[in-house]
Image (tube, rainbow, N blue to C red):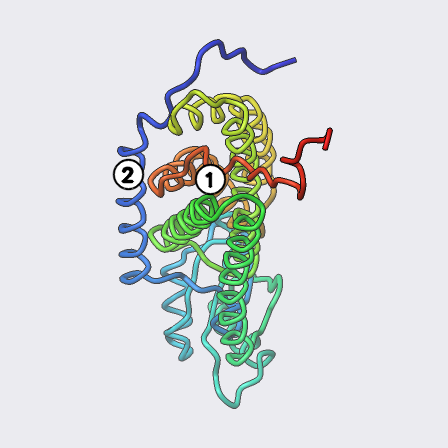
Amino acid sequence: MRLLKINSTVKFMRLRVPALVFSTILIIASLGSLAVNQLNWGLDFTGGTLIEVGYPDAANLDEIRRELDAASFGDAIVQNFGSSQDVLIRLAPREGVKSAEVGDQVMLALRATGKNVDMRRIEFVGPNVGEELTEQGGLAMLTALICILIYVAMRFEWRFALGSVSALAHDVIITLGLFSFLQLEFDLTILAAVLAVIGYSLNDTIVVSDRIRENFRKIRKAESEEIINISLTQTLNRTIITSVTTILVLLALFFVGGALIHGFSTALLFGVVIGTYSSIYISSSVALLLGISKEDLIPEVIEKEGEDLDPMI
């Protein structure tokens, strides 16, 4: 059963110019935020010590910061983690001091006032490992985009390839811009979510591109813009069903999945929304701006040797 019945073609490309202007504004804002605020790199990338502690009552973050400052941990980043009773403390790497010793010193400082503070977990990442992860994470995204560009160019046409990669770069930049603007922690789970967003957006883009190519070969008496509108309309049901079902799962992870995957579900939720938008407007609009036409997608007819000869001779 279909989700909805479409009797007429939706004129998606009529709004392609406002959509491109809107996307350009978002990209500029995202790049500006990344340049000014940068990303709030997690422990996986920066290195250092991460300590999660629990209080019997709501924790006073300002008081905790003063206690740590008095114990020579003035650079500590203190924030709630999941609830007002759970606190996450991040410390930069300290030369010559072991992670276990840092954890003991922090706990002594927090318990000095007689409060019952429980240590939930402690993690340590060396600065060299964090730097290596940062470099490899960036290379992973760049390699994924290059491989996608080559695949789509071979599978469809170079204009579709540029459109697809433009849409994927659009999704990645705006998603990173969101994390930079909101100063959400960016760790390995968020990097995995960004790569998943690339895969999700590509899947939508490939489906739309395949339908456009099919209609270019099937509908001979129509302009490129009209054929793209028809193709987007025909795939609209599939796009809606896929996006809605994915968002429902991600909403469940966001609200009941716990603090550990909160950032992961946030990145995917935003990425699915922006990826659905880009697969409709950015990819197709870029291909249209590059002059995609029926002649580019209709396969050439190769004449066999001797085919033009009279069979009676």
Q: Nearer the viewer, residue 184 or 301?
A: 301
Q: SS of the residue at dot 2?
A: helix
State how far apart marks 1 and 2 are (Cα): 29 Å
What number of labels is visible?
Answer: 2
Q: Nearer the viewer, residue 99 or 291?
A: 291
Given the current orientation, which residue lies at the most extreme bottom position? 96
Q: SS of the residue at dot 1?
A: helix
Question: Are dots 1 and 2 in contact, CB under 8 Å?
Answer: no
Whole-percent x, y for residue 2 in the image: 61, 14
Whole-percent x, y for residue 150 in the image: 54, 55
**Is residue 225 depicted above or below 75 in this figure?**
above
Whole-percent x, y for residue 167 in the image: 43, 45
Q: Nearer the viewer, residue 31 or 66?
A: 31
Q: Which disc, if any, is residue 22?
A: 2
Residue ID for mark 1: 296
Whole-percent x, y for residue 189 in the image: 57, 56
The three-letter amino acid code for the residue at tag 2 is Phe
**Is residue 69 depicted above or below 14 in this figure?**
below
Q: Residue at x 44, y 11 (%)?
A: 8
Q: Is residue 22 left or right of residue 312?
A: left
First-in-chain label (1 vs 2): 2
Q: Nearer the viewer, mark 1 or mark 2?
A: 1
**Is residue 70 depicted above or below 283 in this figure?**
below
| Classed neighbour count for the residue bearing mark 1: other residues with Cα under 10 Å, few (<14), some (14–19), many (≥20) | some
Q: Is residue 83 left or right of residue 183?
A: right
